[in-house]
Amino acid sequence: MKISAYWLANFVYDFLLYLIVAIIAIILIVVLKITAFNSGDALVGTILLFLFYGLAYIPLTYIVAYLFTDYGSAQAGYYFLTFVIGGMLPILTFILRIIGPSSGTIGRGIAWALRIYPAFSFG
């Protein structure tokens, strides 16, 4: 088997599994009538956000996996990294923008630098 076929098959499999979760999340957004995500054109934006997040996050996971030697530490380290960058730093940059003009500039700078990481952009 060619290495490119191996990675393509892994990507397709991982993306299909991700799509199941994304579709369930979108269905829940519609059923629960969360207007911030489904009013007007927001539903199309939400669907595209979920789609592009999966397309960006999965390859990044493959790249970051090369930084670790075993599966367990890779999984734990990447979960922690995703939690901090995708969960905590969007809140921090938002708070910095609210506090004042000088801290808002710092918050925008941090946000601009972290946009390359899909979990931060999703957050």
Image (tube, rainbow, N blue to C red):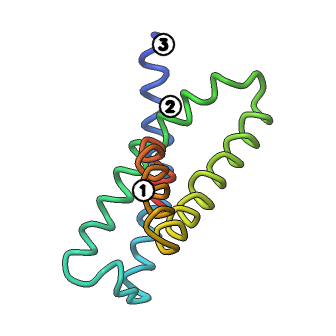
**Secondary element at tag 1:** helix
Among the two numbered marks 3 and 1 on one chain, the one whose residue lies closer to the N terminus: 3
Tell me the residue at 63%/22% (across/down): 66
From what the image shows, is residue 95 above or below residue 78?
A: below
Residue count near mark 3 (Cα–Cα under 10 Å), binned few <14, some 14–19, many ≥20: few
To which quarter of the image does residue 65 belong?
top right
Residue count near mark 1 (Cα–Cα under 10 Å), binned few <14, some 14–19, many ≥20: some
Q: Which residue is mark 2?
A: 10
Tell me the residue at 27%/66% (across/down): 45
Tell me the residue at 66%/45% (across/down): 81
The foreground one among 15 and 93 is 93
**Secondary element at tag 3:** helix
Residue count near mark 2 (Cα–Cα under 10 Å), binned few <14, some 14–19, many ≥20: some
The foreground one among 84 and 107 is 107
Distance from label 3 to label 1 (Cα)? 40 Å
Percent of width and height locating residue 80: 71, 48
Tell me the residue at 49%/55% (across/down): 106
Q: Which mark is residue 87?
A: none
Q: Is residue 79 left or right of residue 86?
A: right
Identified by mark 2, the residue type is: Asn
From what the image shows, is residue 18 above or below residue 94?
A: above
Among the two numbered marks 2 and 1 on one chain, the one whose residue lies closer to the N terminus: 2
Q: Which mark is residue 108?
A: 1
Q: Is residue 19 visible?
A: no
Percent of width and height locating residue 15: 44, 44
Identified by mark 3, the residue type is: Ile
Looking at this view, name the residue that lies furthest to the top: 2
From what the image shows, is residue 78 above or below residue 91?
A: above
Q: Which residue is mark 3?
A: 3
